[in-house]
Amino acid sequence: MTAKPVLWLPRKVSAATIERARRGYEVILNEADTPGSAEDIVAMSAEADAMMPCHSEVFSADVVARLDSRLKIIANHSVGTDHCDLPALKARGIAVTNTPDVLSDATAEIAMLLMLGAARRAVEGDRLVRTGAWDVWSPSFMVGKQVTGARIGIVGMGRVGQAFAKKARGFDMEVHYYNRTRLPADKEHGATYHATLDSLLPMADFLSLHCPATPDTRHLLNAATLDRLPDGAIVVNTARGALVDEPALMAALRSGKVAAAGLDCFETEPGGNPDFSKFDSVFMLPHIGSATVRTRDAMGFRALDNLDAFFAGRQPRDLL
Ligand code: DGY
């Protein structure tokens, strides 16, 4: 019997994932569930044939240069791969995969939650009731912005963007989107395509970000682009913190250009940006877009499918 490949799981993935992983691999767990540091990653590359990291493990060019040649594949437990220097990994001959599709609905749900929470003043309302400070009611009390029937601008119409658009249509929203390429008509479902971000922004009473973080998309929401939004727009980000120039968003919130924001992603994670806490109009979550039981299992299983294919000599479905 040939030895099982050694697989390092730097983070605490779901129990079902660990159970299945143990059937096919010699699994090394990080019981402490602390993010794998550069030193951890380099050290484990000499002990493992494969890794299943999350976006919390950073494979920078420097780390990649120091990886041991034993490591053959990084099967990410994430759809995002901005934590991986893909050209450097390719040059080292290390296969990299991700987990598309399986987290689209869970992430779109969180985008809906953030959009609704920001529009209907969930932070203020929750605090009032929770602290016992709710002592008044009036027709002019806690008036928010209605989502139903409003225009939504979606930046990035990949799998998550499309799942979000479907949910937005359930709220009768008028969907506009900007994407590098236009979707085929049967996938547009009546949405209006914008060939540029500049064209989309003035239509976006609500704006939701669903594109990957790359050098090209860094700070795509900045002082100039925020200024193109309609007055009182609402901004939602469930993609990556790097897409938003945070001080520029705060300035827009202060001026009222942006009425409210729903943020699941921040430039610094974990931790977020404490300056956003000064705004009652910002509804925040700690990067939990894909954090449901069903989706965590599906992500782990998709990563294992990729590993199984790789070690069986087949091309993994999600090879990047
Ligand atoms: C992803 O899969 O990219 C999510 O952001 C969680 O890591």
Image (cartoon, grey):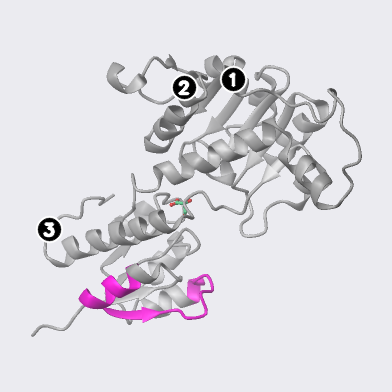
30 falls in the magenta region:
yes
Q: Position of residue 200 (x, y in %)?
A: 53, 18
- Real-space CA distance between mark 1 and mark 2, rounded to the nearest whole angstrom: 9 Å
On the image, numbered disc 3 is attached to which residue? 314
Are there few (<14), some (14-19), or many (20+) residues within 10 Å of tag 2? Answer: many
Helix, strand or loop at disc 3?
Answer: loop
Residue beneath disc 2: 177
Q: Are marks 1 and 2 in contact (CB under 8 Å)?
A: no
Foreground tag (1 vs 3) = 1
**Disc 2 element:** strand
Foreground residue, 136 or 116?
136
Question: On the image, numbered disc 1 is attached to which residue?
Answer: 204
Mark with earlier residue (3, 2): 2
Left or right for 159, reference 261: left
Residue that appears at 85% across and 52% down: 131
CA–CA distance between discs 3 and 2?
Answer: 36 Å
Q: Amino acid at mark 1?
A: Ala
Q: Which residues are magenta?
A: 17-39
Looking at the picture, does residue 119 appear above or below residue 107?
above
Res 149 → quadrant: top right
Is 101 placed left or right of 150 in the picture? left
